[in-house]
Image (spheres, rainbow, N blue to C red):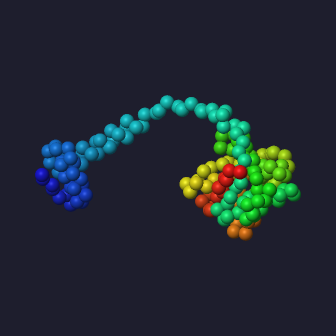
Amino acid sequence: MMVTWCTSIGWSLSVLSALVTVLIGARPVTCRSALPVIITNITDINISNSSAAPPRHARSYPHLQGDTRRRKLFSFQRFFLRIDGTGKVTGTRSKDDVHTVLEIRSVDVGVVAIRSLTTGYYLAMNKRGDVYGEREYSVNCGLKERIEENGYNTYASVKWRKEHRAMFISLNTNGKPLRGRKTHRRNTNTHFLPIIV
């Protein structure tokens, strides 16, 4: 097995050529002879991948619309999200609070509406990012549901954004809702675990 040292490219290419020689059983390759072949193969790959693929068809998910789930949203901060009889949104540590039982209804693909079963108020966020309960469903009530890498869900306003950034439903360490303008997807204040009731 012949391995040549090439000062301009370094020892890694020489070791690589030695491994290729051992694995494939081909003739020994030197740095100078392998480099043009590698460059030619790379340009061939780029040219072949640049061909346009046929356009994908839009998918339809009618079976996901109208799905209803009864859940309690347990925040990463260890609070249950609650919507009381006045439409005020807070967090509580009580497992037995009747205002924490929520209905999560699928409105569209990835979009849900969250409603308190006892009060009938929908979880909503206005243009300023204030989180509150709204009596009737409106554009402020649509929330994008996303499952994060840690298994928790995040809920962002479909309608409102701040400087092209999503505004999320969140509870701080005291159980009070944060204004959506101050939230980020990766911040654990925005993470909720849906618990089956």
Nearest the eye: 101 or 187: 101
Percent of width and height locating residue 127: 77, 54
Judged from this view, the residue extending furthest toward the bottom is 174
Percent of width and height locating residue 122: 80, 50
Percent of width and height locating residue 85: 86, 56
Nearest the eye: 11 or 66: 66
Would you identify the image quadrant in which residue 186 lies? Answer: bottom right
Q: Residue at x 33, y 38 (%)?
A: 44
Q: Is residue 53 left or right of residue 40?
A: right
Q: Is residue 80 left or right of residue 44?
A: right
Q: Is residue 21 left or right of residue 96?
A: left
Would you identify the image quadrant in which residue 57 lies? Answer: top right
Judged from this view, the residue extending furthest toward the left is 1
Q: Residue at x 37, y 36 (%)?
A: 48
Percent of width and height locating residue 154: 65, 54
Q: Residue at x 78, y 49 (%)?
A: 115
Question: Is residue 72 in view from this perspective?
Answer: yes
In the displayed structure, 17 sits above or below 92; it is above
Nearest the eye: 146 or 34: 146
Q: Is residue 85 left or right of residue 11?
A: right
Question: Is residue 165 in view from this perspective?
Answer: no
Q: Residue at x 67, y 64 (%)?
A: 78
Nearest the eye: 167 or 97: 97
How many marks overall? 0
